[in-house]
Image (spheres, rainbow, N blue to C red):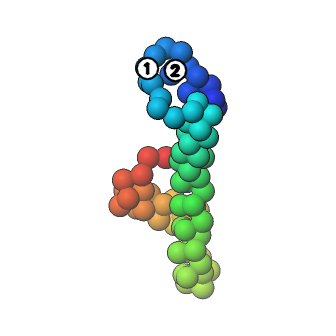
């Protein structure tokens, strides 16, 4: 995907590069991967937060999915994330 993006941008002359095209593609791939992993890292963090309240969630028979979604939404708002 990074290769197609960079090649298209260069071909259309939307960008110019002072570095080697392959290096630019690699940097772009890293950025894309990092952005795609934001939600995975957030989900893991929400699971860790809810793990601290595991007993209370079980004892009160709370809806884990709902708590997960609400916690995730709160973190997204607080951090101004775009998923």
The residue that mark 2 highlights is: 10
For the residues bearing labels 1 and 2, Cβ distance under 8 angstroms: yes
Residue 24 on image: x %, y %: 55, 36
Q: Residue furthest top?
A: 12
Q: Please identify the quarter of the rendering in which residue 31 is found.
A: top right
User: Which residue in the protein does label 1 denote?
Assistant: 14
Q: Estimate the spatial distance between the alpha carbons at disc 1 and disc 2, rounded to whole Å.
A: 6 Å
Q: In this view of the protein, which residue sits in the foreground, 31 or 18?
A: 18
| Element at label 1 | loop
User: Viewer-proximal residue, 24 or 50?
Assistant: 24
- Which residue is depicted at the point 57% across and 33% down? 20
| Residue in the picture at 51% in, 20% down | 10
- Across and down, in percent, residue 81 comes to 42, 52
Q: Is residue 64 above or below residue 31?
A: below
- Give the residue drawn at x 49%, y 14%: 12
**Vertical order, 9 against 68 (above or below):** above
- Secondary structure category for the residue under label 2: helix
């Amino acid at each position: 995907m990074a290769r197609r993006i960079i090649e298209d941008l260069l071909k259309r002359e939307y960008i110019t590069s002072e570095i080697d095209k392959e290096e630019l593609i690699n940097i772009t791939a890293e950025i894309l991967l990092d952005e795609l992993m934001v939600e995975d890292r957030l989900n893991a963090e929400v699971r860790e937060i809810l793990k601290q309240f595991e007993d209370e969630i079980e004892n009160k028979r709370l809806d884990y999915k709902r708590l997960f979604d609400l916690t995730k939404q709160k973190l997204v708002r607080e951090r101004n994330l775009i998923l």
